[in-house]
Amino acid sequence: MAYLETLEKSLYTLVTETSTNLPKDVRRAIKAAKEAENAGTRAAMSLDTITTNIVMAEDNVSPICQDTGLPTFKVYTPVGVNQIEIRKAIETAIAAATGDAKLRPNSVDSLTGKNSGTNIGAGLPVVKFEQWENDYITVKLILKGGGCENKNIQYSLPTELEGLGRAGRDLDGIRKCILHSVWQAQGQGCSAGFIGVGIGGDRSSGYDLAKEQLFRHVDDVNPIEDLAKLEDYIVEKSNTFGVGTMGFGGEATLLGCKIGVMDRLPASFFVSVAYNCWAYRRMAIDINPETGEIINWHYQEGEKITFRDEEAQDNNDNKVVELVAPITEEKIRSLKVGDVVKISGRMYTGRDAIHHHLIGEGVEAPVDLDGQIIYHCGPVMAKDEEGNWVVKAAGPTTSIREEPYQGDIMKKFGIRAVMGKGGMGPKTLKALEEHGGVYLNAIGGAAQYYADCIKSVDGVDLMEFGIPEAMWHLSVEGFTAVVTMDSHGNSLHADVEKSSLEKLAAHAERVF
């Protein structure tokens, strides 16, 4: 009994540390990106927010990003260790961490849409076991959010790639696929990011291999010389695309690339890419199989960058506008792409379930949304001792999922601004122009930074959709975002995608 209790405590500690404290190698990569960025730009401002958020998450012992992802464990056990007990201990630790708001409840029944509220469900959490001859247990955990998970991509060679032409069944074709995978993510995967690549296998084992690469150290060297050269090449060339942090443009688009290879069928040649956001949350521990105690933490090599007491960049290039809802059409039409807004007053969250609900025929909004701001956000929430809701983490989710609904909903309910990350498409852009609306890009992953701007939770509607998908009524102060789509037909996201495609195409000629 003592063993199981200690094991559960060790696993709970692993989950908490993974969710709230970035590893040393990831911190160093973010520090290098920050130092390479041009001062006074939107990208520099974003990196300031990111590093501030890292400090706040560590100090508050709260999630770095509100999307704590789908917990995925890789467990290595000596022969004779009871893997059934370990799986049960993992589930207990996950449920406890969810209850303590270290994780957001993310387990949703695919048929009914019901959220279990515990992160436990059919197939979740993901736990993969492997036996080995070492005399200790190693447990690896990665928390990979939905925004970056949606930017995973798999290629079947040969294929034709936008900007790069034909990619064949050789190392040069692999090179083209990986470059394309970075470009297609744009800011929707919370760049600057990291990628794991799997060459070969079948469709499922290729993705497994790609995700396995994300457990490697950022600064390790691939033992296969050709792949070591390719990893360095991909990072170097990706950072010439100009996608930049959050897709705002800039010097840092990719912070790391790790590639693995396995055999394949003669008829199949897959290149699978697992994209991970800057909030690269993965940790690992070694456990004593007799006591359940942690005996070693991984990713502890080298300097730990704290990001404390760093001076913030001046926002030299951008106009700052104060917004208080309800907002008039005249005020909205005065905004231009590049303006920085600071929001005070009321805003409402709304994600996939809310948008699907509101677009229904005859459906009324639970509150008057005329002139209001909808925030694409699924927060981590907890109750205080008095039973009041408290926001524990509240960064933006990827907005493009709402593209089929957003413009119509804005017109139907009079919404003047929508806020999320990664931008939206031509249908929404047209509606912004016709209706008089803007899209505001918040900094993806900055869940502590934005939670600090939320001063109270004043209500909630549609809780039947679960905590992440409910409509939360939030009172905010100094909530910062950037206008990236305006009411005059301008879209920073479309501009960056076009310019970065031209830069991608410059790498079409054979290299390997």
Image: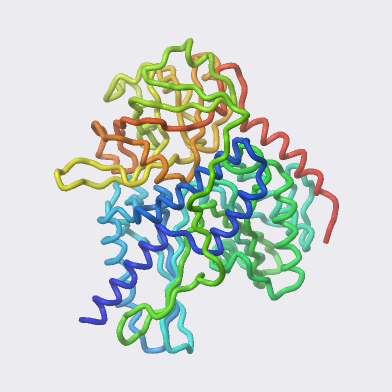
Q: Locate the N terminus by quadrant.
A: bottom left
* Residue 96, quarter of picture: bottom left
Which quadrant is the C terminus positioned in?
Answer: bottom right
The colour scheme applied to this rendered structure is rainbow
Q: Quadrant of residue 125?
A: bottom left
Tell me what residue is drawn at x 70 percent, y 64 percent.
267
Q: Quick check: 122 above or below 37?
A: below
Residue shown at 49% from the left, 30% from the top: 404
Residue 362 seen in this snapshot? yes
Residue reaching furthest to the top = 330
Residue 88 visible here: no
Residue at x 34%, y 20% (from the top left corner): 369
Residue, far left: 386
Query: Residue 41: horizontal and vertical position, in percent?
Result: 63, 36
356 versus 407 height, above or below = below
Q: Position of residue 403 (x, y in %)?
A: 50, 31
Residue 375 position in % (x across, y down): 40, 32
Q: In this rendering, is residue 370 above or below 61?
A: above
Percent from the top left, x then y, of residue 255? 63, 55
Horizontal side of 114 relative to 235 (left or right) equals: left
Drawn side of residue 196 relative to residue 349, left or right = right
Residue at point 33% right, 26% down? 346
Q: Nearer the viewer, residue 198 or 38?
A: 38
